[in-house]
Amino acid sequence: MFGYLLTRMAQSILLLFGVVVIVFFIIRLTGDPASLMVPRDASPEQVEAFRKAMGFDRPVYVQFMDFATGVLVLDLGTSLKLNRPNRAVILERLPATVQLAVAAMAVATAIAIPLGTLSGTYPGSWVDGLGRALGLLGQVTPSFWLAMILILVFAVQLGWFPSFGRDRWISVVLPAVALGLGVMSQLYRLTRAQVLEIRTNDFVRTARSKGLSEVLIMARHILPNTAIALISVMGVQFTYLLGGSIYIETIFAWPGLGSLLDEAIKGRDFPLVQAITVFFASFAILIHLVTDLLYGLLDPRIRRGA
Amino acid sequence: MEATTHPRAAGPMEAFHRDPTFWERLGAVWRMLRRDRAGLLGLLLVLLVVFTAVFAEPIAPHDPLDQNLRAAKMPPAWQEGGSWEYPLGTDNLGRDMFSRIVFGSRVSVTVGVFGVAIALTLGMVAGLLAGYVGGWLDTLLTGTINLLLAIPYVILVVVAAAVLGRSLINVILLFGVTSSPLFARVTRGEVLRIRQAEYIQAAQCIGVPTGRVLLRHIVPNLIGPLLTLATFEMSAMIFYEAGLSFLGLSVPPSVPSWGNMLTQGRKYLNIYPWIAVYPGLAIAVTALGMNLLGDWLRDVLDPRTRRDR
Amino acid sequence: MNAPHRLLALALWAALALWVVGCAAPAAPGAPAAQPPSAPEAAGPEEAAAPAQPPTGPTGELRVALSTMPNSIYMPRAAERNAANAASQLYDSLVWVDDEGNLVPALATEWEVSEDGTEYIFRLRQGVTFHNGEPFNADAVVFSWEMGKDPENEYAYIWEMADSVEKIDDYTVRITTPEPNALFLRFMAYNWMMVPPQYFQEVGVEGFEQHPIGTGPFKFVEWKRGDRIVYEANEDYWREEMPKVKTLIFRPIPESSTRVAAARTGEVHIAQRLSAEEAQTLEDAANVRILSYPVDRVYYIAFNNLTTGKGMPTEDVRVRLAMNYAVDRQAIVDALFDGKARLSTGFITPANLGFDESLEPYPYDPDRARELLAEAGYPDGFSIGMACPTGAYTNFEQVCEAVAGYLGDVGIQVDLEFMESGQYWDLEANKELPPLFGDSWSSALGEAYNRLLGALGGWDATYSSWYDEKIGEYLDQIIVTIDDEARAQLYRELQRYMYENPPFIYLYEPWAFEAVNVAVHDYRPRAAEQYFLMYTWIEEP
């Protein structure tokens, strides 16, 4: 187990380095941002002075070394527009994003797992029909579109929820639903398929023939096995939620990293865009690592096999 | 819409003791299709969208870019104030919504087809090399695949699109490159699995050239899983195109894509809802068709999940 | 798996969509131009709520939506209008521009300008303290200037307009400029915000940005990044009986349809930067009134005679005039802005000094355009490249498409290209855009000088693509003409010259649309979308 842990961690660090390289060079594909950062009526000399002050006149590899060594010591550079360390900017927005992602995941699992279990247990019933319809709905509805309709209906017309912001606990409901719907449909499909498959497995048949009640079979065999399968994909799904937050946070004026990224892109604040992307990727790598380890703990075959 | 929707390692058609020929596969596919109405519906919807995209000119009653400012913001024909000249009404510039949706399918299909073609080509080549050659090449390619998959997809696409600027070519290239790791991973997994099969090892022993082994035995086995993945990816790309439009990062706003129409129409949602609702429905119907088709393909081509019916 | 179950999904989606359609439909069909949201100069807040009286002390909470997230509320670093608006409530400058556009005393009670126009003596107001109790005096002025011109500040150049700032005694300062600058005091009024030296030195510029302190009507309370900026009334403000609200909260809401929703639900009292259509959707909301006013911002299609446009037909003035006649501006404005925009007659707007109201917008006259093109030697037109930014301005993409269409009608084949705005301005700064390109330019000073210099300064101006010697001479003269009347005369002459020799296809000056809660009174935004909230008050529910 310890060896497995070490290998996975070493892999993660290597991956992180790759991410740093990719992100840096993707962003350098474009020109230099100096001319955009100064006011429109500034003269060319002022633009040049600004470029020097920000270090954009140095060779690219020097800028890269600067950035890469910075990441090593958790220094993500300084935002052009905010004049503050990117790390501080990111950390103060992080709680909101985590809260939203966790809430969305909660919404998704709260609907997907019971519904998926019921669907898988009673295939072809009306519950199954409803579940599948909902699952498909989640797959064919763009989240940003759903977000706007939710605001229009539940905030403006019905007045049940705030239309934006993160003021009270109730504020998280609409964005969480909009963000969670896609994941809900993925988890629903997986749960349903798992339950269906396990139900027909030999050990379940054996249990049933031994006269175990359906409830006990569910609790002892079907649900634990389904849980293992779910955990292995929840990590990926969580990453997906982080990505989706860029739309949802912008629409709901949710003060998280997604809206920060949108803002940074629109303001061409490249150091900040770079920092957020690296941060998101590291966060995703970390989550993968944790779910892998968790998976290893739950499923002894992996632990030994590695 | 993420990696997990795609079958990680869908199996070949194990019912055959040898590799089935293409026609045998097609025959099997058709027999199964007749049995599954949902799959048939999906196929029909996809065909409808493709047909619309190909024959957009004869289908659309108007030029999608033709403005008629005097007839702006007309409701659909069946509503008060509507006219059958503009079946789905007109947008804020008096352009025919129906024609724009018809031509919009062309953008979506182009993005989907070419995006998937690039992803498939890149991914398959990388996956075959990694799986078949192995060694340091495998390590390098797998590393790259994992790297691209490590960055949250939407973030990767949004940042790259912001840097590249708005054009159809950029969007296609972007989707092609960023989703190729998925295809590579599936290909590599399949190759590794099939390589273990006795008949492949036998073929190698008797000295059949590598290229022929690949072509004769491995590639046909890949068609199933890759086709399934391609269907889901196509629907995902149509989705992401709309998402990029929403952030102002997709094809230029003058292009009548569904994403652009939805994005530009959203400010009218309250008063002229048809400007935003129909492009949204077009996206949903297309995604529905592709998902039904993908589900069905997976059921057919992957015997392990076929059991669920 | 049976299809009906899956079809149910589509049906549910469609039902939701139709519900939304249904909710809105009754009001909608065929009534796009039903009623204008409000009268053009709708500022008058008294009209509806006559019985309400302004409170005696500061009371209530005013919530204002911002369309972007401010980057900083330290004035030399506040990058754009929203940030500057949020920031300016905290500070004062030496002088102020009132609602009528007059320069009036603020932290300076009086001032004199030397004969040659390069030396100013200011007498400072006595007894003013910063929010932390530090006294305001000549040292604070000198210090603020020294901090302001730090090259890392985005607006350092506005502070560099002064060569020196010297203390004469505790309440007198002398400021010199290298050359006479007719706009210096106006720049100062909007930008030279005074900061407390002792506190600033203690916390440094980063610390100051975290918790800024000024002499202004509101005191900083907290800033939750991306979420809200909270101020409270400065009870010791030197202006009598101001401010009138106890708590002032700014909420950044980037998505305009969400701002509309929040205004309707009353979650915010003021929402700016709405489109005409969005404003229209609020007509039936009893708690909101729509404020609309012309903005001091000119939209135009620029010609280029510096780089890409060299040797193009557009160097011929007849071609440029023809292109101005070819575009049906009124139709564009009617369709895209519900008629709520002023057709431009030049680069000087009615809000500017020296505006010449006798000029009429070029009529839409495609025949005259074709004649002029034929006269210039292009009876069959020509092809030309054009670019426009995306995501930068309301409906501007569609405006560009329409312009390209109208030019096509008279035979000018336009190859229109759209670019994401960041990249666009990059190219514009490098003068690498096609020979025609669309953009807009605002002015915050009540004068058009900046806009004129910025767009017509030739190689000396970053975003300029045009140089005309005659215009250059006018501009040189304007900036050194301190006397307002004489300067106004120069502006009028320049405007007439630019009407006959257009360096742009002049388009329009849009109206701003804002949603304001009916409980809010004396909210008076200016043509540059600036506002000062010290006299704004809110009825207690």
Image (cartoon, coloured by chain):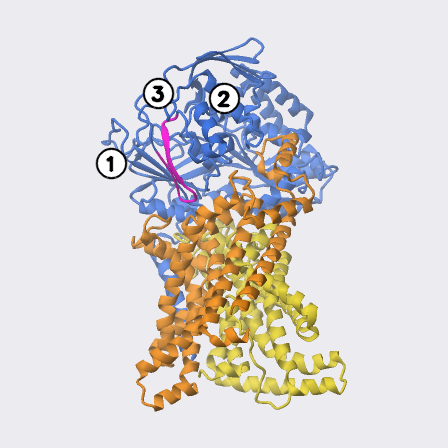
Q: Which chain is blue?
A: C
Residue C11: x and y in percent read 39, 69
Q: Is residue A250 above or below residue C169?
A: below
Task: Indicate yes or no whether the magenta region holds residue C230.
Answer: yes
Residue C152: x and y in percent read 57, 32
**Which segment is the magenta one?**
C216-231
Chain B colour? yellow
Chain A colour? orange
Q: Which residue is mark 1?
A: C540
Q: Is residue B66 above or below residue C96?
A: below
Location of the C terminus of chain A by quadrant is bottom right
Q: CA distance from mark 2 to mark 1?
A: 41 Å
Question: Does residue B33 show up?
Answer: no
Which of the chains bears the disc numbered 3? C
Residue C208: x and y in percent read 45, 32
SS state under label 3:
loop
- Specify whether disc 2 shares its chain with disc 1: yes
Q: Nearer the viewer, residue C289 or C200?
A: C200
| Residue visible at 51% across and 39% down in the picture | A82
Q: Which residue is mark 2?
A: C143
What is the quadrant of residue C222 in the picture?
top left
First in sequence: mark 2 or mark 1?
Answer: 2
Which of the chains bears the disc numbered 2? C
Q: Which residue is mark 3?
A: C238
Q: Nearer the viewer, residue C121 or C528?
A: C121
